[in-house]
Amino acid sequence: MTPSTIELPVSAADRRVATLAAAAIGLSLAEAAIPLPIPGVKPGLANIVILIVLYRHGWRMAAWVSLLRIVAGALALGQFLTPAFVLSASGGVMSLLTLAWAMHLPRRWFGPVGLSVLAAFAHIGTQLLVVDLWLMPGGSLLGLMPLFLAAAWLTGLGNGLATAHLLQYGEPHKEAAPT
Amino acid sequence: MRPRLKGLLPGDVLVLALGLAAVAALWRHQADSLDGRVIVRVDGQIAAQASLRLNRSLSVTGPLGESLVEIRDGRVRVAADPSPRQLCVKQGWIPPGGAAVCLPNRVAVENAAAGYDSLNY
């Protein structure tokens, strides 16, 4: 076996992104196995990881983890480039943009729960918009909007509380030590 | 930058409350708007709209004359119509999501109640 002539330098930050993205992907796969009564309503557990990354490592890192999670998670579930992937990606991007804005809210007043709920609303709102405009134009999907928003409220609250708990009591990741 | 964290901060409560209020308002609005509307069209143009909740009679005028639409107890039907074969009158009460068409008089009555089925779901 010839040794590779191409050396890809891997920085500590790369490793950290990869590790955290792997955690997010793991959660995505795990929740895909949970049977849920209504298609489209998912707990979005991977967002816990993303919120923690946002708090510990900043927005750029969170964006990396989120986008890697979306692409790799879709590949693993066989959804890459399907409508489900487009929904996932559009919701993810809009959540990230919302977080980019929401993270500048005063920290004294707004914690992980608020950010989580805002991101969840942005996520489901964008997805409903995409479905309404692109997948099922003219469909009566908006009639289901209260249901989806209520679900987003609940999952946002749950994920936010989990994030707050982990940020407060969880062990920081080994590689998360200042480098 | 590690912020001091507690489970719920005042802003979070505010976001939660606003979110809940928005969902509740939307839910009520949705329930109102989807809880049965009757749409009456003449020549494809919407001639009258009404709620299924209120008992009333609507009369619309087509090329042959007057058609009478009756809304009673959350149901709707064409009560009278000048069409020769009376198909839309004989059709009786219109099921949710259904429609009765009085073709000669160019009148269509739609029961636009939200009936979720596997198709529109």
Image: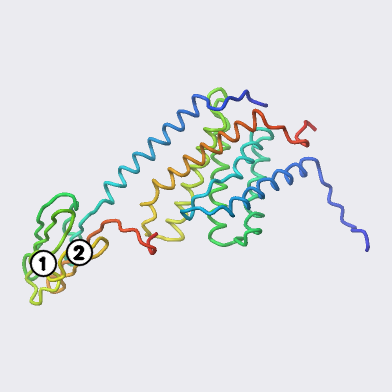
Q: Which residue is drawn at 25% across and 65% down?
A: B98
Give how far across and how far down residue A78 sits, in percent: 62, 62
Q: Mark 1 lies on which chain?
A: B
Q: How far apart are marks 2 and 1 (CA)?
A: 20 Å
Outermost residue on the bottom side: it is B85
Give how far across and how far down residue A63 sits, in percent: 64, 43
| Up-down relation of residue A39 to residue A155 (above or below) | below
Helix, strand or loop for disc 2: loop
Of residues A160 and A13, the one nearer the viewer is A160
| Label 2 crowd (10 A; few <14 / some 14-19 / many >=20) | some
Numbered badge on residue B62: 1
First along the sequence among labels 2 and 1: 1
Tell me the quarter of the picture where residue B69 sits.
bottom left
Of residues A48 and B39, the one nearer the viewer is A48
Which residue is label 2 attached to? B94
Where is the N terminus of chain A found, in terms of image quarters?
bottom right
Display colour scheme:
rainbow
- Judged by depth in the image, the label closer to the viewer, 2 or 1, is 2
Q: In this view, does B40 lie to the left or right of B2?
A: left
Question: Label 1 sits on what residue type?
Answer: Gly
Where is the C terminus of chain A found, in terms of image quarters?
top right
| Label 1 crowd (10 A; few <14 / some 14-19 / many >=20) | some
Give how far across and how far down residue A38 sits, in percent: 46, 54
